[in-house]
Image (cartoon, rainbow, N blue to C red):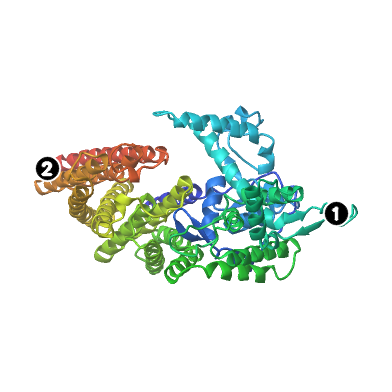
């Protein structure tokens, strides 16, 4: 009966975790007005390899597209119904290709996520749901109202000390997202429209109006520019037939000025450029290699036209474009770029979450039906394989990120989640090697799955590229190596102690210890060891952090919330170990104090970043506090349940001893 109870609880936990993990999956019930045509796989792969300069670094288009889609849609893919009622999934690369090359398709896609209908009601739009997804066409009639509202809020922000409420902030974000999306829609207008040459004054009235590619026109702008300068010098006006031509060019420049930055500089002292910037540089004569820029424009026009004509050579033209743009990278940039392309394709953390930790959760849950049988041992061995492989994949992803960013593996909040996930799983598997009781093994895939899903959800909530360069105060690979990984492993050890304490309470409530009394002693040793490691690592991390602070800020300690949190872990674990050594707390006391360690670690690791005060401003986060307080609440319930179980079992033991 106890085994079935354990299995039921574990299955409920699996269902709950996977349901929570899948809460971002969305399918729009309203079909598109156009039949969606999927992009060939080879096109998606080639497009992903175009270099873009964004966020102060060079990244693949796949990363740029992913961050953009997450920012607009709140997810890495869109799911909707086409005109045939079939479900369509559009990933980041397909979304970006649609916006750039098929804007008519893109405008009807449910791109923008609006979680507060009051935003749209305020600009005169009627809504049916409090939270929903909207296409650009659905919002187009209300754009001006939206932009006017946003402009007013931007003016408020300029006033010192002014903070916007959540509705106004979300309105401002939506307006910015719509504006940014519009730059994608018009980015290839120079290739779409070209330049219409007006009839010359002496041309016949029925003569044909010519349209030439923008790149062809750019070959003559040097002469036009010199002509304009000479006319200004002579005090003469510009010929009338040139005015509409230059207006068209200026329009193309403005329409593509704020889109993706894809033109690499000719030297280190120059900046990367957008289509609009490149056109303007050539027009003004500021481009040291105008022929190179014009050649790039010509290739982009060929690429765009081959897609519009549904030509079979579009994939080939795309590969030519990739080669042309990649050819501007130096050897170091190319190496980092190739690593990130590989990182995006491998999806290390996705594989670890869904193909390793999730099966491990299922196999270990089933093995608890008969852990001592051959069937149970086989399932435990399979769990070892899947959990170990999940750990290897997680570490591989962490190492790949460190190589791409040229820094130690932990530099922001996202890094800490995946690093702590790897740390706790490693501690659990190492503990299982020593104890061989399947307790730590049973917890490892669950905590690995939970933390990697948490990292994924954090990335979606932050709507940012978590591999962007660090701010100046953190650009010290020495201290990032000495302090940050150590203190983060201290967090991992503290959370491992918390996890073992939770398992202990679970075992005592279910009564599994009655079948094997040694389980209690094993769990107690596991918890004690984790608390010792947490103290050691947290102490070293706190001291090295103080030395770093003295080096950067001129003071060792300033009672910063982050510093206070680290000190709380050190003081609490010292109290736990001294109380244990002094006999003040025994088995139950150690486990209950270990459960209290969890909120203390979470406060230091995460909650301090939500306070918005202190010198550790680089760690501030806009993430919701709800998850943190939910953890505190659940932990309090576990603690109360454990204390009640302890009192009941102590009373029963006292009655038996006195009988």
- Nearer to me, 198 or 512: 198
Q: Indicate which disc, 2 or 1, sits on the residue closer to the N terminus.
A: 1
Q: To which quarter of the image does residue 435 belong?
A: bottom left
What secondary structure is found at the residue carrying circle 1? Answer: loop
Residue 565, horizontal then vertical, whole percent: 24, 42
- Nearer to me, 515 or 296: 296
Q: Is residue 561 left or right of residue 363?
A: left
Q: Residue at the location (10% across, 49% down)?
A: 581
Residue 297, horizontal then vertical, whole percent: 63, 62
- Nearer to me, 184 or 370: 184
The C terminus lies in which quarter of the figure?
top left
Question: Residue beneath label 1, please?
Answer: 202
Q: To which quarter of the image does residue 115 belong?
A: top right
Residue 184, horizontal then vertical, whole percent: 62, 51
- Nearer to me, 461 or 49: 49
Q: Are marks 2 and 1 in contact (CB under 8 Å)?
A: no
- Neighbourhood count class around disc 2 (C-alpha, 10 Å): few under 14, some 14–19, many 20 upward: few
Q: Residue at the location (66% across, 38% down)?
A: 139
**For the residues carrying marks 2 and 1, which lies nearer the camera in this image?**
1
- Neighbourhood count class around disc 1 (C-alpha, 10 Å): few under 14, some 14–19, many 20 upward: few
What secondary structure is found at the residue carrying circle 2? Answer: loop
Establish if 99 lies above or below 136: below
Is residue 3 something that shows in the picture?
no
Residue 188, horizontal then vertical, whole percent: 66, 55
Q: Which mark is residue 584?
A: 2
Establish if 641 lies above or below 351: above
Is residue 429 something that shows in the picture?
yes
């Amino acid at each position: 009966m106890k085994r079935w109870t354990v299995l039921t609880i574990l299955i409920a936990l699996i269902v709950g975790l996977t349901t929570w993990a899948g809460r971002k999956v969305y399918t729009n019930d309203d079909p598109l007005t156009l039949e969606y045509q999927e992009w060939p796989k080879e096109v998606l792969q080639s497009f992903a390899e175009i270099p873009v300069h964004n966020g102060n670094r060079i990244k693949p288009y796949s990363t740029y597209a992913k961050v953009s889609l997450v920012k607009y849609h709140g997810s890495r893919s869109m799911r909707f119904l086409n005109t045939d009622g079939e479900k369509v999934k559009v990933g980041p690369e397909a979304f970006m290709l649609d916006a750039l090359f098929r804007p008519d398709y893109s405008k009807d896609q449910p791109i923008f996520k609006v979680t507060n209908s009051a935003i749209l009601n305020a600009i005169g739009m009627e809504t049916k749901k409090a939270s929903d997804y909207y296409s650009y066409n659905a919002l187009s009639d209300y754009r001006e109202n939206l932009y006017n509202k946003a402009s007013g809020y931007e003016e408020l922000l300029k006033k010192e000390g002014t903070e916007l409420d959540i509705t106004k902030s979300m309105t401002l974000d939506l307006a910015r997202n719509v504006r940014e999306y519009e730059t994608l829609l018009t980015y290839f207008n120079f290739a779409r429209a070209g330049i219409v040459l007006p009839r010359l004054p002496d041309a016949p009235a029925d003569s044909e109006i010519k349209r030439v590619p923008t790149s062809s026109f750019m070959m003559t702008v040097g002469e036009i520019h010199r002509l304009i300068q000479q006319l200004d010098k002579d005090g003469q006006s510009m010929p009338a037939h040139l005015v509409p031509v230059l207006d068209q060019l200026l329009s193309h420049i403005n329409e593509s000025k704020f889109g993706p930055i894809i033109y690499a500089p000719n030297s280190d002292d120059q900046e990367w450029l957008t289509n609009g910037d490149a056109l303007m540089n050539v027009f003004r004569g500021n481009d040291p290699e105008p022929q190179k820029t014009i050649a790039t424009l010509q290739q982009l026009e060929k690429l765009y036209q081959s897609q519009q004509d549904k030509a079979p050579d579009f994939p080939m033209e795309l590969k030519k474009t990739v080669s042309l743009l990649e050819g501007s990278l130096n050897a170091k940039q190319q190496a980092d770029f190739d690593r990130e392309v590989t990182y995006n394709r491998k999806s290390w953390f996705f594989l670890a979450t869904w193909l390793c930790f999730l099966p491990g959760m299922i196999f270990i849950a089933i093995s608890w039906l008969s852990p001592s049988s051959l069937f149970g041992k086989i399932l435990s061995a399979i769990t070892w394989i899947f959990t170990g492989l999940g750990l290897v994949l997680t570490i591989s992803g962490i190492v790949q990120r460190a190589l791409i960013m040229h820094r130690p593996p932990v530099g922001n909040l996202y890094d800490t989640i995946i690093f702590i996930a790897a740390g706790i799983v490693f501690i659990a598997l190492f503990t299982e090697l020593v104890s061989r009781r399947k307790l730590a093994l049973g917890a490892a895939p669950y905590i690995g799955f939970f933390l990697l899903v948490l990292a994924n959800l954090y990335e979606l909530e932050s709507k940012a590229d978590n591999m962007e360069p660090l701010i100046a105060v953190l650009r010290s690979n020495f201290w990032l190596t000495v302090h940050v990984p150590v203190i983060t492993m201290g967090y991992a050890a503290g959370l491992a102690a918390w996890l073992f304490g939770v398992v202990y309470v679970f075992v005592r409530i279910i009564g599994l210890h009655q079948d094997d009394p040694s389980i209690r002693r094993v769990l107690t040793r596991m918890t004690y060891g984790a608390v010792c490691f947490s103290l050691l690592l947290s102490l070293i991390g706190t001291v090295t952090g103080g030395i770093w602070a003295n080096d950067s800020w001129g003071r060792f300690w300033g009672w910063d919330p982050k510093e206070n949190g680290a000190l709380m872990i050190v003081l609490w674990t010292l109290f736990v170990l001294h109380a244990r050594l002094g006999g003040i707390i025994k088995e139950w006391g150690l486990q209950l104090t270990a459960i209290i360690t969890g909120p203390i670690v979470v406060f230091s690791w995460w909650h301090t970043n939500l306070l918005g005060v202190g010198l550790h401003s680089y760690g501030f986060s806009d993430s919701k506090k709800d998850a943190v307080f939910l953890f505190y609440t659940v932990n309090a319930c576990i603690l109360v349940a454990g204390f009640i179980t302890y009192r009941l079992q102590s009373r029963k033991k006292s009655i038996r001893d006195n009988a």
